Image (cartoon, rainbow, N blue to C red):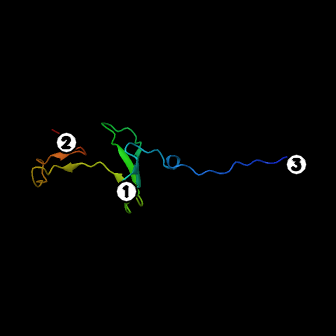
Amino acid sequence: MSTEPVSVAPPTLPTIHDALPGPGDGSGPTLSAGLVSFDIPLSLPVARESTPALTLGYSAGAGNGPCGTGWRLALPTIQRRTRLGVPQYNDDDVFVGPDGEPLVP
């Protein structure tokens, strides 16, 4: 049996940068409120024409949502253009993408 002393490294807690998984642009604490927020880009398989950009975002000040407390998932949408009034729900309606631009000119 050995009588040599054993050295044990004390455990350390992770820093805030180590604890948060892969934040995207615009992440970090909101200094005025002291709340943290960050975005995690989700990789998707390549689509035929284009691949939508999906991001799972977290905000410490947000309430409960479908992805959990503080989490949000912004989904790109296609909708009828209502800038010129109420849609007619016929072939004359123009559909716009997430950026508000017409999908078919």
Give the residue pinned by disc 3. 3
Label 1 crowd bin: few (<14), some (14–19), many (20+), radius 10 Å: few
Q: CA distance from mark 2 to mark 1?
A: 35 Å
In which image quadrant can residue 32 be found?
bottom left
SS at mark 3? loop
Q: Nearer the viewer, residue 103 or 25?
A: 25
Secondary structure beneath disc 2? loop
Please provide percent x and percent y for residue 84.
9, 50
Residue shown at 41%/61% (left/top)?
69
2 vs 3, front mark: 3
Give the mark nearest the N terminus, 1 or 3.
Answer: 3
- Amino acid tagged 3: Thr
Earlier in the chain: of badge 2 and badge 3, it is 3
Q: Position of residue 21 (x, y in %)?
A: 48, 47
Residue 93, given in percent of the width and then of the height, sits at 13, 48
CA–CA distance in space, label 2 to label 3: 77 Å
Q: Which residue is mark 2?
A: 101
Which residue type carries mark 2? Glu
Residue wearing tag 1: 33
The C terminus, quarter of image: top left
